[in-house]
């Protein structure tokens, strides 16, 4: 009999009912008063023109129907100026007692900030030139029972920006614009690849075993098959099966899941773009990046230069991008004789250069990679392709023709963070097995035998790459915090 403790599931944190307060009570009272005047608090569909379209096609005296959330209201006795906001824009509306029925104006005074209304009226310009809708009739579409954050101070609790994203989007134009840009970036990526003959595909998110990367997976159980499964850590091995099957150019935009840390640049659930091109290699992947990123800048941002982070660092995405060998970067920091030094001398030198931790068990390979990871990568601010990396770190790539100790790959680094690796993919099933065996060690069950079998049916020379979309959006929208570009990031229970 299984141990009950091992089967216990973590208790769900119960949701709290809305707290009663004077503001909520007053809004409920206003809702009831509106209902008595014939304004049902939660209405139905309302035919309207989006506010951005009204602004674009503005013409004085034109009659329009619009709808949105009431964001501001400045009442002046028998008249009022207000602003409504829909998903596209904010627009001024003008209410005047003489233009409405007595009942409609009386009901208008019961509206609260946050309510959704529909209006119909005439377009005009104020003396200051602001486009405005003169309201001739209005409808209540949805009553807001909760008080929104105060306009000029917004969300005081920074975590509420992520826990209550709806309030963040409601109050912050910057946040709304960032997620609009994210959507546009995804659309342009798809358009760029499809114009070049790539086909978008979907591969399983639940897999029999984790593959395509070295990461800790999330586990689940498939009841219908009575089988333990993992949430995928990468789609790579399935996409390569498609190359074996005869699809020449494929890409997938989707979620990966890694049961690892959460910090400013990592979220356990994240979005990845993976691309594979038959008869290509590392250089064909490099060409995609140097074509796609400028297009994103041109189409979405309107500039190659992005102001990044709190310091306002300028990142320039105009190609061509720098290409430099891994060993040259290491020598540039540690000296031309680095790879000839005795191990203990090298450790002492790494400590002098600022490496905070050195494991006594590290060999020269691991020490060098730690130097690169902790001391060098963060200094690569402008877009950089780091090439010719030790093959032990990239088991799914082909080695360099002139040096089998290195792999024919790049790591594309921007603002000190790896954004995308690109490979000349390994298509030799015998070499692939050796590399996976070395990576798995004694855990030979981790080797995906079905993938090896697929390679034995023949895979053409192939270029491949995987790009972290969340990090890409961070860099293109200038934020250093991954939670700012994920609508609903993972959070600890409050």
Image: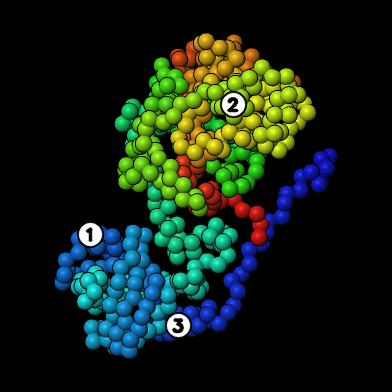
Mark 1, Cα crowd under 10 Å, few <14 / some 14-19 / many 20+, is few
Discs 3/1, front: 1
Q: Position of residue 323 (x, y in %)?
A: 46, 26
Badge 3 element: helix
Q: Position of residue 98 (x, y in %)?
A: 23, 87
Between 329 and 80, the one lying in front of the other is 329
Question: Is residue 101 visible in the rendered structure shown here?
Answer: no
Up/down of 125 relative to 12, above or below:
below
Discs 2/3, front: 2
Q: Earlier in the sequence, mark 2 or mark 1?
A: 1
Residue beneath label 1, please?
Answer: 56
Mark number displayed over residue 30: 3
**Where on the picture, by quarter, is residue 285?**
top left
Q: CA distance from mark 2 to mark 3?
A: 69 Å
Q: Earlier in the sequence, mark 2 or mark 3?
A: 3
Residue at point 81%, 47% (across, down): 5
Q: Position of residue 389 (x, y in %)?
A: 56, 22
Residue at point 15%, 72% (across, down): 61
Between 321 and 4, the one lying in front of the other is 321
Residue at point 58%, 65% (across, down): 157
Q: Position of residue 99 (x, y in %)?
A: 23, 83
> Position of 195 compared to 420: left or right?
left
Q: CA distance from mark 2 to mark 1?
A: 55 Å
Q: CA distance from mark 3 to mark 1?
A: 35 Å
Residue beneath label 2, please?
Answer: 330
Badge 2 element: helix
Q: Which of the image's four quarters has the N terminus?
A: top right
């Amino acid at each position: 009999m299984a141990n009950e403790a091992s089967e216990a599931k973590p208790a769900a944190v119960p949701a709290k009912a809305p707290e009663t307060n004077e503001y909520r009570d007053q809004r409920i009272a206003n809702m009831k008063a509106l209902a008595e005047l014939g304004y049902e608090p939660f209405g139905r569909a309302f035919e309207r023109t989006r506010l951005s379209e009204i602004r674009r096609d503005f013409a004085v005296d034109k009659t329009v129907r619009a709808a949105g959330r009431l964001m501001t209201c400045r009442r002046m006795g028998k008249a009022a100026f207000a602003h409504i906001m829909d998903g596209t824009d904010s627009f001024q509306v003008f209410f005047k007692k003489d233009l409405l029925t007595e009942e409609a104006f009386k009901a208008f005074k019961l509206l609260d900030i946050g309510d959704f209304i529909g209006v119909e009226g005439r377009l005009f310009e104020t003396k200051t030139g602001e486009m405005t809708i003169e309201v001739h009739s209005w409808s209540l579409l949805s009553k807001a029972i909760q008080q929104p954050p105060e306009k000029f101070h917004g969300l005081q609790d920074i975590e509420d920006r992520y826990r209550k994203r709806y309030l963040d989007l409601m109050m912050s134009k910057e946040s709304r614009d960032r997620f609009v840009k994210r959507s546009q970036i995804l659309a342009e990526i798809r358009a760029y690849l499809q114009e070049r003959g790539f086909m978008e595909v979907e591969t399983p998110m639940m897999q029999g075993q984790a593959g395509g990367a070295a990461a800790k997976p999330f586990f689940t159980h498939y009841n219908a098959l009575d089988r333990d499964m993992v949430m995928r850590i990468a789609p790579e091995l399935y996409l390569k099966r498609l190359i074996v099957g005869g699809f020449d150019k494929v890409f997938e935009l989707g979620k990966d899941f890694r049961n690892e840390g959460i910090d400013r640049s990592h979220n356990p659930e994240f979005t990845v773009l993976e691309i594979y091109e038959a008869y290509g290699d590392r250089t064909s992947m490099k060409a995609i990046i140097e074509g796609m990123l400028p297009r994103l800048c041109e189409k979405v941002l309107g500039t190659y230069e992005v102001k990044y982070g709190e310091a306002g660092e300028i990142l320039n995405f105009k190609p061509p991008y720098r290409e430099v060998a891994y060993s040259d970067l290491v020598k540039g920091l540690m000296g031309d004789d680095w790879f000839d030094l005795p191990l203990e001398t090298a450790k002492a030198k790494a400590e002098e250069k600022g490496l905070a931790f050195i494991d006594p068990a590290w060999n020269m390979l691991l020490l060098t990679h730690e130097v690169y990871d902790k001391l060098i990568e963060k200094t690569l601010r402008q877009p950089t392709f780091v090439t010719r990396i030790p093959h032990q770190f990239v088991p799914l790539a082909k080695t360099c023709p002139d040096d089998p100790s290195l792999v024919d790959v790049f790591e594309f680094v921007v603002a000190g963070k790896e954004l995308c690796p690109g490979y000349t993919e390994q298509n030799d099933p015998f070499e692939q097995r050796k590399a996976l065996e070395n990576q798995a060690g004694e855990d030979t069950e981790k080797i995906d035998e079905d993938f090896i079998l697929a390679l034995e049916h023949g895979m053409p020379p192939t270029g491949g790459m995987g790009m972290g979309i969340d990090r890409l959006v961070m860099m293109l929208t200038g934020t250093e915090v991954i939670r700012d570009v994920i609508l609903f990031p993972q959070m600890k229970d409050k």
